[in-house]
Amino acid sequence: MSSGLRENLRTILSYRSALIGIAVILALVAVSVYTVIAIPYEEAVRLWRGGEQHWLDTPRYAYPTWYSFLLQKRLPETIIRDTTKPGPGVYKVVVPAGETIRILRIDAEFTFDYDDFPSEINVFYTVRFNRSAPQITLTWIKPDGTRIELRKFTPSSDGAYYVSSDAALTSREVERLVAEIGGKPNYELSPTITLFAVEDQTLLDRNTARVMKGVYRLSVEGLMFDPQSDFDLKLVVYGKVYGWAGTDYLRRDIGIALLWGTPIALAFGMIAAVSVALIQMSIGAVSAWFGGAVDNAIQRVTEVFIVLPFLPTLIMVSTLYKIDIWTLLLVIVLLLSFGPGVKNYRALFLQLKESQYIEAARAYGASSPRIVLLHLVPRVIPTMIPSIVFSVADFVFLEAALAILGIGDPRTPTWGKVIQDSFYGGALFKGLYYWTLQPAFLLLITSLSFALVGLALDKVFNPRLREV
C-alpha cells in the first residue's frame, strides 16, 4: 500500500501544473498560519468592525504603497505630528506671563517632498481648563515663508478641526490668490491644494498645479488663563497610499481582510468539500447496500433536495436567523448532504456490491458494517479525492458570492466582504480598482490552484485520463 502511495505521489509530482497548484496552496496555508498567529481572530474582528473612529489616522480611499511604483511618481504617505508623543518635528513651550496667564507655543514641523497633494488635513485637539478656555490661533507656514491663518477659536472641549472641509478658508485663499496671481482658478480650489501648491500661474489649472516641496509648519499660539489649563494637538496630513493593500471608504486597512480571508476561505472550502463528500458517500453506501425500503426512502429524499432551490433557501435561512459564517457552513452542508452525489455514489456501490470478493466476504460471515467500511469504501475513496479537491474551489467561490449578496456574518473580514464593500463604496466608478481586484485575484489563484491539483489527481486515479 505504501509503495502504491509513493508511486501515485511521484506521478502527481510529474505534472508541472500540479507542482504549481501545490506551491500556491502551500503558500496560502503559510499565510493562513501567519495570520492566525499574528492577528488573533477577535483582534481582527475588533479592527475590522471598529469603524472609521478606530482608523482616524489612516487616509480614506488610499492606494496600496506599491501603486507609486506603477505610476513612477511619489505619492504622499500619511504624516502625523502629535504633541502628546514628543519626537522630531514637534515643539511645545508654555511661558508664564503673569500670575494666571500663560503663553502657549506649539510648532508641528514636517518635510513634504512628494509629487502629489495630500488627500486630507485634520487637526485633532484636547483641551483642559478649570474656568476659562484658552484662546488658540492656528497658522500654516509654507516652505517659502507664506503664512496662512487657518483659524482662531476658543475650544471648550476636545474636538477636531477638519482643515480640508473649511469652506471659509477656501474663500479667503481664493480671494488672496486672485489678488496676488492676477487670475482666477478654473476649478474649485480646496484647502489641501492651496496649502501645498506653488502660488503662480500654474495654480490656475488643476492639471498644471504643482506641489511646493520643502519644510511645512503648523504654528499654534495660545493664551491660557488657568494655571492648570493645557492644550495638545495632533496634526494628520493624510497621504494617498497606505500599506500593501490600501484602505476603503471607512479608512480601514484592506490588508486585514485579505489576510484573514485566506484561512477563512481555505477552512470554509475544505471543511465543506470533505463533509459533503463523506456524507453523500455514506448515504449512497447505505442506500446501495441495504436496498429495499431504505433505498427507496433515501432516493425520494434525495430527489426532493435536488429540486429544492439551493440559493433561495439559503437566503431565506440567513435572512430569518442572522447566522454567522460557521453556522452558514453547517446549513450548506445539510442542504447538500442529499445532493446529486448520493445517486452517483449509489451507482458505484451497486457495481461493487456484485463483485466476487464481496460475495466471498459474505460467505465468510462478515457483517454489513465490516463489508461496507473495509471492502467497499476503500475502493470508492480514490475516486472521491479529485472531486473533493475540485469542489474546494466551488465552495470558496460560494462563500464569496454569498458575502457579496450580504448573506452570512457581517462581522467576519473575508474576500467576499471586501468585494461587497467595494461595490457599496463605488470603487469601480471612482477608479479604485485595487479595492475589487485584490480579493478577486486571491479568489482566482485559490480556485485555479485547487483545479490544477484536481486535474492531476483525476489523471492519476482515473486511468482513462492518463497521458500516454
Image (cartoon, rainbow, N blue to C red):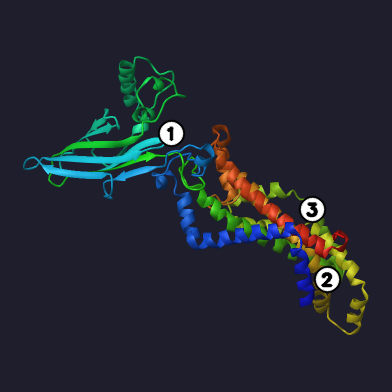
Q: Which residue is mark 3?
A: 306
Question: Real-space Cα distance between discs 1 and 3?
Answer: 58 Å
Tell me the amino acid under the disc marked 2.
Arg
The image quadrant of residue 111 is top left
* Lateral position of residue 466 relative to residue 30, left or right: right
Look at the picture and state if 10 lies above or below 44.
below
Q: Is residue 231 above or below residue 462?
A: above
* Residue at x 40% of width, y 24% of height: 189
Asked if residue 200 lies left or right of residue 217, the reply is: right
218 or 130: nearer the viewer: 218
User: In which quadrant will I find the N terminus?
Assistant: bottom right
C-alpha gap between disc 3 and disc 2: 26 Å
Q: Which residue is mark 2?
A: 379
Q: Earlier in the sequence, mark 1 or mark 3?
A: 1
Camera-nearest residue between 70 and 361: 70
Can residue 129 be seen in the rendering of this structure? no
From the top left corner, tell me how far across and down residue 245 is, in percent.
52, 46
Q: Amino acid at mark 1?
A: Asp
Write down the residue under mark 1: 116
Secondary-structure class at tag 2 = helix
Q: Position of residue 197 (x, y in %)?
A: 37, 28
Find the distance from the CA under tag 2 to the CA under tag 1: 65 Å
Earlier sequence position, callout 2 versus callout 1? 1
For the point 56% across and 59% down, which residue is it?
31
